[in-house]
Amino acid sequence: MTLRLVPQPLGPHGGRSGCRIDLSASLNPLGPSQVALEASRSCEVDRYPDPRAGPLVEAVAERHGVSEDRVVPLPGAAAGIWLCFLALAGQGDTALVVAPCFGEYDRCARMVGADSRRVWSWPPGSWPPPALRTALEQRPRVCVLANPSNPGGSAVPSWQLSALCGEHAATTFLVDEAFASFAPAGTSLLDGDLPDNVLVLRSLTKELGLPGLRMGYLVAGPRPASALRALLPAWPISAPSLAAAVAGLGDLEHVRRGAEAARTTLGRLRRTLEAAGVPTFPSDANFLVAESPVLPAALAIRGISVRDCTDFGLPGHFRAAAPRPPDLKQVLAAVAEAGGG
């Protein structure tokens, strides 16, 4: 069978609003890891980086206690989604997508000609959603879900997710852990034995606060990891991104403090939104979802952007990242002033 990719238009994404305070992209609220930032600035850009991004593979293996043959280096998590669909699915295959969700899951499924079917898990409740269990009984080729969920922010304990994957060995699960570093302990599947049918996707741009440097990785079994690495181009990660990723993987204190700051600022933001009459949803990540079709525009007038959730599948809702501590007072004042919009 000849693989023919079907071009798909790029959907909306956050992080480029132009507002002074941009809460449309969910990053470490402490800003960039200075260790990673300095490494990116001091690297040699007049020489080619490692063609296989070997230093990143080594650093990931050390951080998670896995063998290097289980690691796939990536120029950002979004590239990992594309790579996985390229390798795992094709014309006539079914890809289950747990929604509401990042639009790139559906987009990449359509690129390879797969049938993307959304299974809804909203509002957050018991796990797994009955509809997901029913859909998995049909033995789909791929099931994609985020843990914590995006945009919802709810996390599933790793033991529950691992059990579900183990019950459906015929399906390959792509688990997007882009925000797992901000979630409670016991969320990441990388903290225990990874089921054979699971690929875990991680982003470094978010936890290190450096979205302009595209860097991430996948962890999987040796066989699928080998197949994925064989699809990568030479030099998959630029020298500045590679240097930042390797240095940042060791800056766990910055990530820990960022997660703590996110819990604090989001807690205050949620209380202020609720006091203003704006319903919110609990979150285990560094962002939250609130329901108001008019507040985003009211905040934009005041120089604050949030992420509209229509393309996630939640019209009338928005996602707000944890504000940076210096911006918190202004954000809370704007919410209180705007009220419900």
Image (cartoon, rainbow, N blue to C red):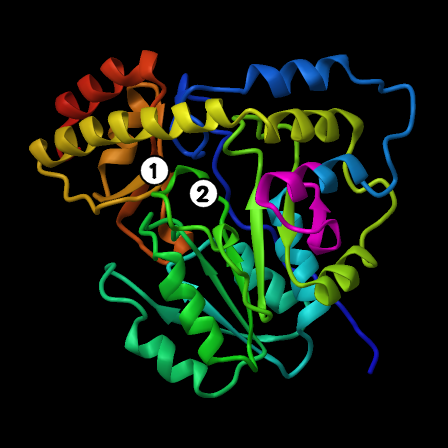
Q: In the picture shown, does residue 185 fall above or below 46?
A: below
Q: How many marks?
A: 2
Mark 1 → mark 2, Cα distance in angstroms: 9 Å
Q: Residue at x 25, y 26 (%)?
A: 264
> Residue 39 appears in which quarter of the rendering?
top right
Circle 1: element type: strand
In this picture, which residue range is highlighted in magenta?
59-75
Q: Residue at x 69, y 76 (%)?
A: 90
Q: Residues within 10 Å of mark 1 (few under 14, many from 20)?
A: many
In this view, the residue in front, 71 or 335, is 71
Residue holding disc 2 = 179
> Residue 24 appears in which quarter of the rendering?
top left
Residue holding disc 1 = 287
Circle 2: element type: loop
In this view, the residue in front, 8 or 271, is 271
Is residue 81 visible in this depiction of the protein?
Answer: yes
Q: Residue at x 26, y 31 (%)?
A: 266
Residue 49 in percent (x, y) is at 86, 31
Query: Which residue occupies the extreme bottom position in the image?
Result: 138
**Split into 4 quadrants, where in the image is the C terminus?**
top left
Q: Is label 1 or label 2 in front?
A: 2
Amino acid under label 2?
Phe
Residue 130 in percent (x, y) is at 29, 77
Q: In the picture shown, does residue 7 fall above or below 213?
A: below
Kindly check if marks 1 and 2 are in contact, taking CB atoms under 8 A apart as contact. Answer: yes
Residue 228 in percent (x, y) is at 75, 60
Residue 60 in percent (x, y) is at 65, 41
Question: For residue 101: magenta?
Answer: no
